[in-house]
């Protein structure tokens, strides 16, 4: 559902999901582990690395571009940009 993950995450529009997106944006120095699945149907996740928050947007043009990439329409609240942490972070 997030074709550019882990550097771009499309946050759904459910109230709890949108609230957690905003909460993440308020913690720019928090380093957190990211796990992904190669395909939605996969049962297992793999560790992608540690990431930090970079930016958040709910601009209509940003949401529209993300929707076009993922095929999700009228389902997004925010697009979140993350960056991978370096060993020194």
Image (cartoon, rainbow, N blue to C red):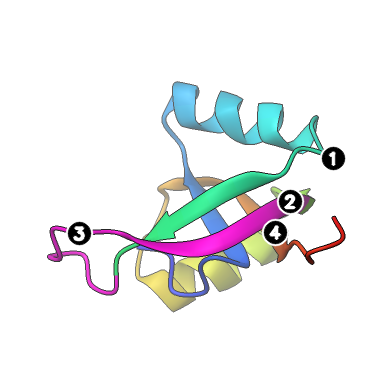
The image shows residue 35 at horizontal and vertical percentages of 42, 56
Report the number of numbered marks.
Answer: 4
4 inside magenta stretch: no
Which residue was labeled with disc 3? 44
User: How many angstroms separate mark 3 from mark 2 (CA)?
Assistant: 23 Å
Q: Residue furthest front?
A: 87
Segment tinted magenta in the rendering: 38-53
Q: Are marks 1 and 2 in contact (CB under 8 Å)?
A: yes
Neighbours of disc 2 within 10 Å: few (<14), some (14-19), many (20+): many
Which residue was labeled with disc 2? 52
The image shows residue 58 at horizontal and vertical percentages of 69, 48
Q: Nearer the viewer, mark 4 or mark 2?
A: 2
Determine which of the numbered discs, if any, sits on residue 82 in the image. 4
User: How many angstroms separate mark 4 from mark 2 (CA)?
Assistant: 6 Å
User: How many angstroms separate mark 1 from mark 4 (CA)?
Assistant: 11 Å
Please tell me which residue is depicted at 46% across the width and 37% down the height of the picture: 13
Work out which quarter of the rendered image holds the N terminus and state it.
bottom left
- Asked if residue 18 lies left or right of residue 87, the reply is left
User: How many angstroms separate mark 1 from mark 2 (CA)?
Assistant: 7 Å
The residue nearer to you, when weighing 44 against 23, is 44
Please tell me which residue is depicted at 70% across the width and 59% down the height of the picture: 81
Label whose residue precedes the other's in the sequence (1 or 4): 1
Which residue was labeled with disc 1? 29
Label whose residue precedes the other's in the sequence (1 or 3): 1
User: SS of the residue at dot 2?
Assistant: strand
Label whose residue precedes the other's in the sequence (1 or 2): 1
User: How many angstroms separate mark 3 from mark 4 (CA)?
Assistant: 22 Å
Label whose residue precedes the other's in the sequence (3 or 4): 3
User: SS of the residue at dot 3?
Assistant: loop
Neighbours of disc 3 within 10 Å: few (<14), some (14-19), many (20+): few
């Amino acid at each position: 559902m997030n074709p550019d993950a882990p550097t771009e995450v499309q946050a759904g529009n459910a109230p709890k999901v949108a609230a957690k997106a905003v909460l993440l944006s308020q913690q720019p120095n928090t380093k957190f582990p990211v796990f992904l699945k190669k395909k939605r149907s996969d049962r297992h996740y793999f560790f992608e690395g540690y990431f930090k928050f970079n930016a958040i947007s709910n601009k209509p043009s940003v949401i529209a571009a993300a929707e076009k990439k993922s095929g999700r329409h009228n389902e997004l609240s925010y697009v979140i940009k993350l960056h991978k942490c370096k060993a020194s972070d």
